[in-house]
Amino acid sequence: MMTWRWAIRDLLRHPTRSALSLLGVAVAAALLLDMVMLSGGIERSFGELLRSRGYQLRISPLGTLPFDTEATLGDVTALTVALRRDPAVREVAPVLGSTMQGAHGAIAASLVTYGVTPTSQGIYTLESGRDLTATDTVGILLSVPAATRLGAAVGDTVSLRGRLDPQMANAGAERRVLVRGIVRFLYDAREQPSVAVALAAAQRLGGPDLTDRASVLMVRIDEASDLTAVTARLRAAHADVAVNSIDDLVAQFRLRLTYFRQLSLILGSISLVVTVLLVGTLLAITVNERSGEIATLRAIGVARMNIARQVLVQGLLLSVLGGAAGMVLGLGTARWLDAILTSFPGLPAAISFFVAEPAPLAIAAATLLLTGVLAGLPSAWRAASTPIAAALRSDAP
Amino acid sequence: MLRRLASCVVLITVLWPGHAKAQRIGIAIEQRLAEASGLAVGDTLSVASPNGGPRRPAVVAAIIEPRADPATILRKEYRVRFHLADLAELLGQPDRIDRAAILLQPGVDPDSARALLDRTAFGYELHGTAALAASSSTTFLVVSRFHRAIAIISVLASAIFLLCLMLLKVDARRQDVAMLRFIGISRRTVFIALLLEAGVIAAVGGVLGIGIAALTSAAVNAFYQQTFATTLIFSLLTWRTIVEAALLGLVLGLGAGALAAWRLVRLPPLVLWGRAG
């Protein structure tokens, strides 16, 4: 307790210097916090998004990731039946993605159109109105951007046009559909105008090219089943398609985000170096200034260990106070940086780059505190080994 | 002139030469694929659409080195070029394309041509080259904004660090300053001396920093160019950056030095010496 009081008193003795050092440590701690959040944040965010509807597997055309290309799976009915034969598979949700034209009155807009099986889908949540039913082939669900662009609301009738022929300037297929509800598509980018209709309706609008086809199959398996074993089994049974678990997809995603992981490592390390330099310099100067006082303490019998502990506690105190201020500052800057990065084109709106997770944050805090202590070690050693007589002589008036 | 483009993921397997019975098509593969798979000009492959459909034998007619593209570098995909008709047939979508590039006659205003074509557009959209370039560079603009934000935080941290160091350094010279004042050196002279010292430290630190930046930049480029097997430049240290950084460092150093020096010279010499209030 005495040691802490000594450290606090010493910091208060030079308020400007201590405040600046604390501010420096706080900015370094904020940067460290942001980089820890960035290093794994988007992966966790992406994983959580994929898991949000409970489908553990995605099946896409061989050599592709879901919705990464325009390739589609063929013979979807047979594939779905075959997948359902696996005892661990509880549900298979096919999704067909394509681009179609929507029209409401005089307004026409290009729309991302999802064909879904309304009773088992994992790509949207209902916001208003009602969902499609299993037999509903004349209903449509709009995202808010699609509704805004078309100027349509629940209860309105809109036209959906597929197989557009630029040469003949006509649509090969057109269907009038009733807006049943407004939904939020989980994987959509910001302001993406998307709609959902029954899978059969989307396939018909797409024409022969899309008959019995889907872009991806989302598969839900029994919670009690071993996901790795089921994935391996399905891969062996369906070698002509790509079977990916959420962990596989996150791993692929991670590969594309190498840059951010490396950047966070570099900047996180720099912030620790800044902390070491700040705390180390402050303590070195403090020990220099107090050499006479330290020699007196040693002369009256205070143990070397106690002197060293006092210096180390001062370093720890700087790290604790600076780190606490840095946490607040870091959360603020993380929101600012996240707002910048989430404006990446095509990125799902639900994804965050900076995610605060207890374990990484605890590791960052522990690293910062340890850094503060380590930075004080040379000064603590110097203070503990101060030659008493020489220090007292040089400090004498 | 209309340049038509079609693209798709295509599955490729290497065939033994004797297996190529059907009519073979010529393809060009990129250097990375050739190196990774040990393919050479004249080798025969089997190509198919992931949508299904028949496989076709294809002969490697050329090995190409596509222009380095930062947009696709992290995807690590391999590029294969087909004749348009071959790819369309392979995909089962004859006479279809993803996009077309239009070269206008000299003197034709692109905006008015686009407006004219837009009036008759059905099932397609027209984009001017400038708008398309702006749109496709959005990713890099976001990265650039992110870098700028990180730079602001770094400058803030550096400024505080510098101010702190100057304060500590000048503070450590209290007795020197007191002595100078005792022997009659004016506050102004002491202030200028401390300021000059801060300026020299900032300038030397700046030069060292630029040296470290040049080394780091070279290391970053070497690492990423090897990692991604590309000629792209990842870290670019320009003269403008150097001058801006040096000036910023000097201004911050002088500012911090001035503040620290002012705090010191305004105190009476006895206080600085530690023998008065």
Image (cartoon, rainbow, N blue to C red):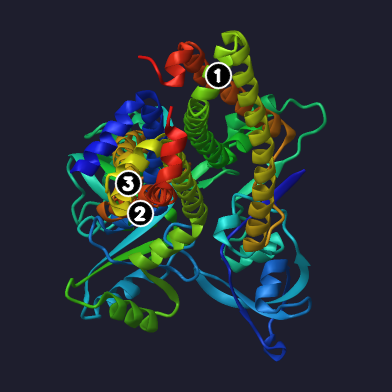
- The amino acid marked with disc number 3 is Arg
Q: Same chain for the residues at labels 3 and 1, yes or no?
A: no
- Where disc 1 sits, the SS reads helix
> Is residue A110 shown left or right of residue B12?
left
* N-term mark: 2 or 3: 2
**Do marks 2 and 3 share a chain?**
yes
Number of numbered discs present? 3
Q: Dot 3: within a 10 Å radius of its alpha carbon, few (fewer than 14), some, or many (20 or more) residues? A: many
Figure check: A126 above or below A253: above
Which SS class for mark 2? helix
Q: Could you say which quadrant of the image residue A243 lies in?
A: bottom left
Q: Which residue is mark 2?
A: A46
Q: Nearer the viewer, mark 2 or mark 1?
A: 1
Rendered location of residue B129, percent (x, y) = 67, 35
| Mark 2: amino acid | Phe
Q: Is residue A308 visible?
A: yes
* Dot 1: chain letter: B
Residue located 41% across and 35% down the image: A27
Residue placed furthest toward the right: B106
Please give the label number shown on residue A298: 3
Residue drawn at (29%, 55%) of the image? A48
- Tell me the quarter of the picture where residue A92 sits: bottom left
* Percent x, y of residue A128: 19, 37
x, y percent for residue A78: 33, 75
Name the residue type under label 1. Answer: Met
| Residue A337 position in % (x across, y down) | 42, 37
Seen in the image, is B129 located left or right of residue A392?
right
Residue A78 horizontal side relative to residue A4, left or right: right
Q: Dot 2: within a 10 Å radius of its alpha carbon, few (fewer than 14), some, or many (20 or more) residues? A: many
**Numbered tag placed on residue B179 in the rendering:** 1
